[in-house]
Amino acid sequence: MFNGIDAEAQQRFINLIDILVDIDVRVTFHSSHTLHRFLAAASGRPDAFRMQSRMQLLRRDSTRC
């Protein structure tokens, strides 16, 4: 999961989320993990609060089981 990825790759992902939200781009993410589980794994980063805030803006797919 996120905490198993090197810090530079984590930062690039965080920056991507930040930019996509700022320019209001519609994007779809697919994961075998819930958003809550992903955010919990990423919570150890010093800048995780910003990514968590941005990702909470994502609409969840209600068709997912």
Image (cartoon, helix red, strand yellow):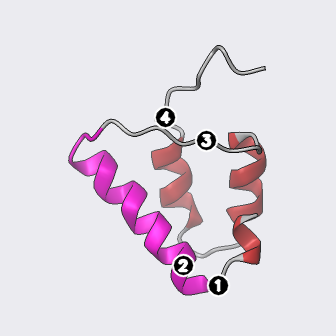
Answer above or below: position of 3 versus 62.
below
- Distance, label 4 to label 2, CA atoms, is 21 Å
Q: Which residue is mark 1?
A: 6
Q: Residues within 10 Å of mark 4 (few under 14, many from 20)?
A: some
Q: Pointers 1 and 4 in contact (CB under 8 A)?
A: no
Q: Residues within 10 Å of mark 1 (few under 14, many from 20)?
A: few
65 sits to left or right of 59: right
Identify residue type, mark 3: His
**Secondary structure under the numbered disc 1 in the rendered image:** loop
Identify residue type, mark 1: Asp
Who's the residue at 70% across and 21% down the image?
64
Callout in the foreground (4, 2):
2
Q: Pointers 2 and 1 in contact (CB under 8 A)?
A: yes
**Magenta region, residue range:** 6-25
Callout in the foreground (1, 4):
1
**Sooner in the amino-acid sequence: mark 1 or mark 4:** 1
Answer above or below: position of 55 versus 6.
above
Label for residue 30?
A: 3
Callout in the foreground (3, 2):
3
Label for residue 9?
A: 2
- Distance, label 2 to label 1, CA atoms, is 6 Å
